Image (tube, grey):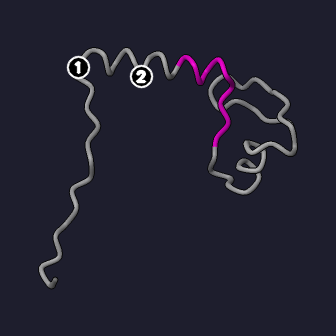
Amino acid sequence: MKVQCVLCDTVEEVEDDSLQAKRLRNRRIYMYLCSECYDRIGDKTRKRHATGSFRLYDTKKKQKDLI
């Protein structure tokens, strides 16, 4: 199965029987990233976490008054 990276547009070959190929076929929203882009994003994310100013905000859940 031929796949294309979302960020750098490189075309790579993925085995048809792999879990990643199955996810790409069944869920069209699932995006493919090549290993170089995946590693680059991971490194930059770890650097942002290390600065201490990186926050993940959870959505506020509304309390149900009826229960």
22 lies left or right of 7: right
Q: Quadrant of the N terminus?
A: top right
Q: Distance between the residues labelled 2 and 1?
A: 12 Å
Q: Residue at x 64, y 41 (%)?
A: 31
Residue 2 falls in image quadrant: top right
Q: Residue at x 22, y 22 (%)?
A: 53
Q: Residue 45 carries which label?
A: 2
- Disc 2 packing (10 Å; few <14; some 14–19; many ≥20): few
- Disc 1 packing (10 Å; few <14; some 14–19; many ≥20): few
Q: Is the magenta stretch mostly helix, strand or loop?
A: helix
The residue carrying mark 1 is: 52
Q: In which quarter of the image is the C terminus?
A: bottom left
| SS state under label 1 | loop
Q: Say if 3 sits above or below 34 in the image.
A: below
Which residues lie in the magenta part? Answer: 31-40
Q: What is the three-letter code of the residue carrying label 2?
A: Thr
Query: Horizontal and vertical percent for residue 11?
Result: 80, 27
Residue 37 falls in image quadrant: top right
